[in-house]
Image (spheres, helix red, strand yellow):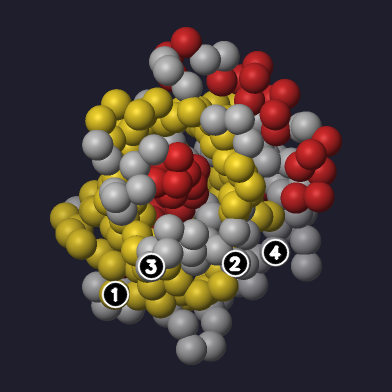
Amino acid sequence: MELEFWKYEGAGNDFVLIDGRDNGLNPSKEVIAYLCDRHRGIGADGLLLLMDTPEYDFRMRYFNADGGEVAMCGNGARCITLFAHHLGIGGKVKRFLGLDGSHEASVLSAENEEGIIEIGMIEVDSYEFGDRSFFLNTGVPHYVEFVDNVDAVDVVGRGREIRFDSRYEATGGTNVNFVQIIGPGELRVRTYERGVEDETLACGTGVTACAIATHLYAQNQCCDFTAFVPGGRLSVRFSTSDGQHFQNIRLSGPARRIFQGTITTNYLLAE
């Protein structure tokens, strides 16, 4: 069969996007892995399906490159918001439903293929603290470790070790972030993403976790952070009344449409 798709990226985190409003697509894990395969398919860190749902502008379904569906992807959410904007869905402020709940997205700017998108993230009201490390959920689970030099970290080797640590079996493993504080409200972050099983150029839920962890660990007067990642720059801001519970969390950064195409596949899409 022939499948129409779009390719978007947010700070280097790249995705295959499919408009599933009229066809009710529910692709199997094998199909998703095939589409995301960088050698035999289109190639991406994940796949996003835009779906209809009552009382919202759209529903977002996100799948990692291995085909597993997860609750949230910050960069993916920005990309699908720009995709919805390109499709003429909603206004400059859009409400969408993800697996982790409802979100509000703002199109801060959009011109041709590119835009700056801000996403409202879920509240964070619990975390675990270790030796220079934190574990918290910003839509998906994240381990955050503070390091002196992020360039010196074996992100894939150490990231894979932590990702599969028995401590995180209950959450299906964890994403792993290494963060270097470079100044007030400024971070450098590298991330190993579960489901991709490699370092990615950016992770939106990851830098959100890193910003909150930095507030808790070293900069408790700062609620507005800039994170420099291998794929670019992302911003995170939030509010907290007691330094323990975090609300009004906003992730902003670039999104860009790369190309549109069709792919012919002999795989069957699951009903």
In this rendering, position of residue 81 left or right of residue 134: left
Q: Amino acid at mark 2?
A: Asp
Residue at point 43%, 36% (across, down): 202
**With respect to residue 10, does 77 lie above or below?**
below
Circle 1 or circle 2, nearest the eye: 2
In this rendering, position of residue 44 left or right of residue 112: right
User: Pointer 2: what residue?
Assistant: 100
User: Pointer 4: what residue?
Assistant: 26
Q: Amino acid at mark 3?
A: Ser
Between 254 and 15, the residue placed more toward the observer is 254
- Mark 3 neighbour class, 10 Å CA radius: few under 14, some 14 to 19, many 20 or more: few
Circle 3 or circle 1, nearest the eye: 3
User: Pointer 1: what residue?
Assistant: 93
Q: CA distance from mark 1 to mark 4?
A: 27 Å
Between 184 and 35, the residue placed more toward the observer is 184
In what quadrant of the picture does the C terminus appear?
bottom right
Q: Quadrant of residue 251?
A: bottom left
Disc 1 and disc 4 in contact, CB within 8 angstroms: no
User: Pointer 3: what residue?
Assistant: 241
